[in-house]
Amino acid sequence: MTTAGHAKATKTHSEKKRKKINTSKQQEFLLRNKLLKGKDTTLREHMYLKLYPWKTRLALAEHLKSSEVYNQDGLIALCKPYGVAQFGKCDKENSTGIQGVHTGGWSVLPDDLPGVMDALPDLRLMYGEPELQVVKSTERWSSGLIILSTSPKITENVQKCWKRSKTLEEAPLTFWAVTVGLPIPVSHATKIGIKTEYVENMGNVPVLAKKYSQASLKRGEVRLSVVEHQALAFNKETQAGLVQVKTQTTKHHFLRVWLAHSYSPALGDNHFSGRVHTISGKRLHVSPHNLVSYEPQVLPDSFYSKLQLPPRKTELIPCHLHLSQVQLSKFGKEKSDLIISAPPPEYFMWTCKQLSLMSENDVDEQNELRINS
């Protein structure tokens, strides 16, 4: 075969594989929409189908207000639910070329799901504040802390804390993740970059950058971050883990890319989990330039029974990432570190219980914190 003929055959094979992946995604989309609308009675009451009870922006605002974990000196911290965007259903925050390919993208959620900014006017009225700004929010496909301020001065002070953490090489954001597999190594700390890289037929996708130039940093092509992870719990039977990750950035889905790089993708992550495949019991990296890396997450059979799901229905599982803690370095008049924490949502704790990553007492304790926060 000539070089040109080989290239043409390779391209045809690549296009067929991409079409197969997209067809699979469409089938998953139709199934999940069917389940979200309650047309499948077998799963209608499942925990994962109760994530979006808010039909109006006022209902979301009331929920956010009830989730308050901190309110002092013009700084307010609430808990953002999974799937709620900052700017509503058309939000493209942290979007990449692969965002629309996977379930877990915005099209599988209820069409009228309001965003944080939609609820902000009602929150201002509830708090009696003339001004309320979003200073920091976890990304749409995770749950956890959202930081609000009541004045530009407070916002400026918080932003100074982020810059200070970067200078001191501190990781102010702490996440919890339910993972598929134990990270390798089990605990690790480093400084690494993240950037986007063009992949044929997929567009720009995020990748880690171990090597980079100062020029690429200045141009903003590479974002550096201190990152540290450690396993908090692991179930050998199911191969499920509970991992804590500390980071400076969430840009370009950094957290999920890092977990996949560490051989332990987040449960429910259909964006990047395909970058890890298990062959003959050994976990191996798959290049983002290989279309296999864009296939849906593959879980051990034990996961489905433990999570009370039909086999292979990974499209029903939300991405299990939770921003549990934010540290503001030398914040306020006293110039002391302010640490704000938020317990995981109910579905996250239920998963931990089902996968034996937490005891009944641990779950009850976290739920008590969530209720009383």
Image (cartoon, grey):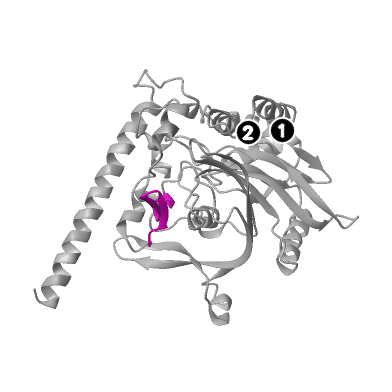
- Compared across the picture, whether 104 is left or right of 158 comes to left
* Dot 1 alpha-carbon crowd within 10 angstroms: few under 14, some 14 to 19, many 20 or more: few
Task: Judge by depth and name the residue closer to the eye, 173 or 112.
Answer: 173
Query: Which quarter of the rendered picture does the C terminus lie within?
Result: top right
> Mark 1 touching mark 2, by CB under 8 A?
yes
- Compared across the picture, whether 136 is left or right of 333 comes to left
- Magenta range is 271-287
Report if residue 275 lies within the magenta region.
Answer: yes
The local secondary structure at tag 2 comes to: helix
Q: Position of residue 280 (x, y in %)?
A: 36, 50
Marks 1 and 2, how far apart at CA:
9 Å
Disc number placed over residue 126 in the picture, else none: 1
| Image point (53%, 77%), residue name | 212
- First in residue order: circle 1 vs circle 2: 2
Report if residue 108 lies within the magenta region.
Answer: no
- Compared across the picture, whether 345 is left or right of 285 comes to right
The local secondary structure at tag 1 comes to: helix
Label 2, on which residue?
61
Q: Which amino acid type corresponds to the residue marked 1 in the rendered image?
A: Met
Relative to 227, is 167 above or below? Answer: below
In the displayed orientation, state which residue is furthest to the right. Answer: 334
Q: Position of residue 58 (x, y in %)?
A: 60, 30
Labels 1, 2: front one? 2
Q: Which amino acid type corresponds to the residue marked 2 in the rendered image?
A: Ala
* Dot 2 alpha-carbon crowd within 10 angstroms: few under 14, some 14 to 19, many 20 or more: many
Query: Which quarter of the rendered picture does the N terminus lie within?
Result: bottom left
Q: Position of residue 304 (x, y in %)?
A: 41, 31
